[in-house]
Amino acid sequence: MNVVCCIRYQIDPFKRQAFERYAQDWGKIIPKCGGELLGYFMPHEGTNDIALAMIGFDSLTAYEAYRARLRTDAESVANFTFAEREKLILREERTFLRPVRS
């Protein structure tokens, strides 16, 4: 893994349970489409509307191929549709990180 996509979600705090379902569904979709899911993280203490996801890839090219597969995978499309219909996500930001190697 050379690149980590960190997704920062601002979620509706009153729909945390539905967002957690959305995140759990990605647990099987992401690996199937070529990403290495490092985890989804829900608000626990403090801010109640920020969630994170971290997904690893060998390269940005691998990330782009993964994104293309997400657009055609039936489970992925259904999960995106669920999030839109329920209006779970108010804002989404992606940051690409690289691991520090010693």
Image (spheres, rainbow, N blue to C red):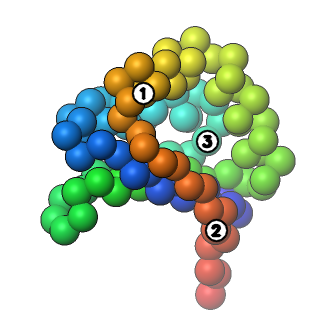
Residue under numbered circle 1: 83
Residue under numbered circle 2: 97
Mark 2 or 3: in front is 2
Residue beneath the point at 42% across and 27% down = 83
Q: What amino acid type is highlighted by mark number 3?
A: Gly
Q: Quadrant of the C terminus?
A: bottom right
Within-10-Å neighbours for mark 1: few <14, some 14–19, many 20+: some
Say whether residue 87 is visible: yes
| Label 3 element class | loop
Q: Alpha carbon of mark 1 to alpha carbon of mark 3: how far?
A: 20 Å
Q: What amino acid type is highlighted by mark number 2?
A: Leu
Residue beneath the point at 78% across and 41% down = 64
Residue 24 is labelled as: none
Above-or-below relation of 65 to 57: above
Q: Are marks 2 and 3 in contact (CB under 8 Å)?
A: no
Q: Out of 95 and 31, give the one closest to the viewer.
A: 95
Q: Position of residue 59 (x, y in %)?
A: 78, 55
Q: Residue furthest right?
A: 61
